[in-house]
């Protein structure tokens, strides 16, 4: 795990990348970890400027693979948004989070659910937020893994409204970035990538963190190639570290602090 906080004990780390994608691993992780929160990477203060651009206070937000991160609580408590449903595949962590939030945040809930097969109706959310879950599921580029990710992306796409955003916090490993950009560009969505300011402190050897922003568009025949060209070519040329200059170009030359810029409309 990369982050500025102490990592999990050695015995909690996966034996190989494949374990990251297994529900048994996560159940064991959260049972052994107990109640201590563990923020996989990207803490609220550094993510806030990007999240504020794409999440509006009245949005319905789905957090997939919430773990016991404090991110949703901090979004709620700062008024960024309140209508938040958090899901995770680990029963232990969902029970823990339900207990932790009892009576405190009435508009937010924690539900045991697999992101590959969700119970929500179509077009139910304006935002799907994923911090580290795609990275955990997309452990390699084997066919079985890629088809699992196709199911995840199809579900994310199904539950989002047109105009909705899939915000994915990732370390932008080359195969993860490639899969996300290719899948959503081909669907006709707009894909943006932000490097999170201050996440890659070289003095502490902390890996840089990225937020992919995939905005759902109606699929228009013939347009997919163009969108992939505009966004895909730039992004795929220089993974995993994207200069911030690229993103300024991507959002129309806004070089100022994103927290000070208008919300996404
Ligand atoms: C790297 S952790 C990130 C946890 C949290 N978002 C954070 O940033 O601290 C990945 C999370 O995804 C969850 N997860 C893995 N596969 C899942 C699936 N198929 N459906 C829902 N959650 C899943 C795990 O239980 C774990 O909580």
Image (tube, rainbow, N blue to C red):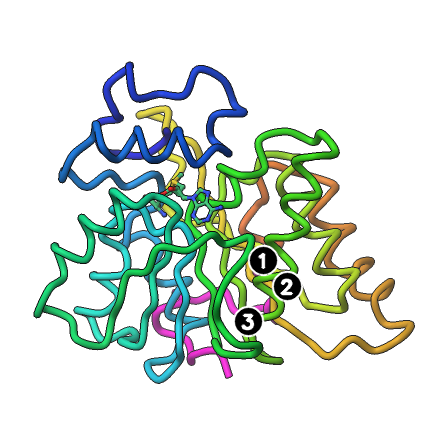
| Image height of 5 relative to 111, above or below | above
Q: In front here: 52 or 101? A: 101
Q: Are marks 1 and 2 in contact (CB under 8 Å)?
A: yes
Q: Secondary structure at mark 2?
A: helix
Cα–Cα gap, marks 2 and 3: 26 Å
Residue beneath label 2, please? 250
Depth check: 231 or 252 in front?
Answer: 231
In the rendered image, residue 207, in percent from the top left (x then y), is placed at: 43, 32
Image position of 82 with respect to 26: above or below: below
Secondary element at image label 3: helix
Spatial CA span between label 1 and label 2: 5 Å
Eye-nearest disc, 3 or 1:
3
Disc 1 is placed on an element classified as: helix
The mark nearer the N terminus, 2 or 3, is 3
> Do the residues bearing badges 3 and 1 touch, measured as CB atoms within 8 Å?
no
Residue, x 30% and y 21% (percent of image)?
12
Task: Say few, some or many: other residues with alpha carbon within 10 Å of mark 1 (under 14 / 14 to 19 / 20 or more).
Answer: some
Provide the residue span drawn in magenta. 248-265
Residue that badge 1 annotates: 247
Q: Position of residue 259 (x, y in %)?
A: 35, 69
Q: Position of residue 152 (x, y in %)?
A: 59, 53
Cα distance, mark 3 to mark 1? 27 Å
Q: Nearer the viewer, residue 165 or 259?
A: 165
Give the residue pinned by disc 3: 159
């Amino acid at each position: 795990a990369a982050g500025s906080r102490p990592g999990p004990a050695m015995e909690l780390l996966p034996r190989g990348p494949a374990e990251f994608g297994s529900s048994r691993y996560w159940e064991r992780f959260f049972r052994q970890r107990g109640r201590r929160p563990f923020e996989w990477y990207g803490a609220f203060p550094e993510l806030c400027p990007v999240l504020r651009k794409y999440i509006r206070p009245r949005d319905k937000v789905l957090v997939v693979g919430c773990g016991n991160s404090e991110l949703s609580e901090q979004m709620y408590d700062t008024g960024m948004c309140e209508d938040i449903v958090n899901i995770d595949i680990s029963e232990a962590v969902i029970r823990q989070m339900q207990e932790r939030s009892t009576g405190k945040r009435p508009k937010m809930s924690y539900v045991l659910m697999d992101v590959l097969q969700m119970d929500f109706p179509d077009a139910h959310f304006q935002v799907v937020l994923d911090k580290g879950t795609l990275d955990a599921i997309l452990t390699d580029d084997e066919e079985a893994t890629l088809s699992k990710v196709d199911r995840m992306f199809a579900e994310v796409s199904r539950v989002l409204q047109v105009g909705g955003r899939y915000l994915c916090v990732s370390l932008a490993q080359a195969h993860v970035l490639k899969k996300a950009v290719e899948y959503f560009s081909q669907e006709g969505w707009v894909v943006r990538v932000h490097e999170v300011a201050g996440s890659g402190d070289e003095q502490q050897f902390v890996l840089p963190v990225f937020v992919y922003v995939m905005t759902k568009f109606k699929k228009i025949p013939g347009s997919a190639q163009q969108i992939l060209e505009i966004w895909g070519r730039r992004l795929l040329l220089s993974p995993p570290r994207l200069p911030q200059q690229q993103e300024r170009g991507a959002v129309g030359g806004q070089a100022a602090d994103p927290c000070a810029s208008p919300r996404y409309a």
